[in-house]
Amino acid sequence: LDAELQLDRLKPKLSRRVLLLQGHQSSWHRELALAPGTPPLCHNLTAYLRDEADFKDKLSPVALSLSLALPGGAPGLVLYGDTLVQAQVGG
């Protein structure tokens, strides 16, 4: 499967407020090799909120998306669901 994670996806790429600790990027992409009988595959990613002085928008939610697609063999076929997970964290 081709897996792609987008952090703060509603913002333009250069204005994103959340970045991954490793690589300081707002997205992550991996090809996941799955085979029958193999154990579950886990990836832990650490993200951080940029310093408040680096952006003006402090009120809109931070939207994340994860897409899973079959590589190459089935053009246009994407595996995904419409899942909304919302949490508000106050500081």
Image (tube, rainbow, N blue to C red):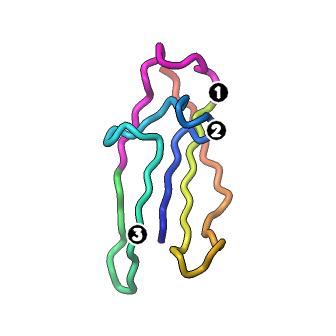
Do callouts 1 and 3 mark residues in contact (Cβ within 8 Å)? Answer: no
Q: Which mark is residue 10?
A: 2
Foreground of the two, 19 or 91: 19
The residue singled out by tag 1 in the image is 60
The span picked out in magenta is: 45-60
Residue 61, position as x, y percentages in the image: 62, 32
The residue singled out by tag 3 in the image is 32
Q: Is residue 87 left or right of residue 49?
A: right
Classified by dominant secondary structure, the portion drawn in magenta counts as loop
Q: Which mark is residue 50?
A: none
Say whether disc 3 or disc 2 marks the residue closer to the N-terminus.
2
At x 36%, y 68%, the residue is 41
Residue 65, position as x, y percentages in the image: 57, 50
At x 47%, y 18%, the residue is 54
Q: Amino acid at mark 1?
A: Ser
Do callouts 1 and 2 mark residues in contact (Cβ within 8 Å)? Answer: yes
Measured in 3D between alpha carbons, the distance from the residue under mark 3 to the one under mark 2, in whole angstroms, is 25 Å
Q: Amino acid at mark 2?
A: Leu
Crowding at mark 1 (Cα within 10 Å: few <14, some 14-19, many 20+): few
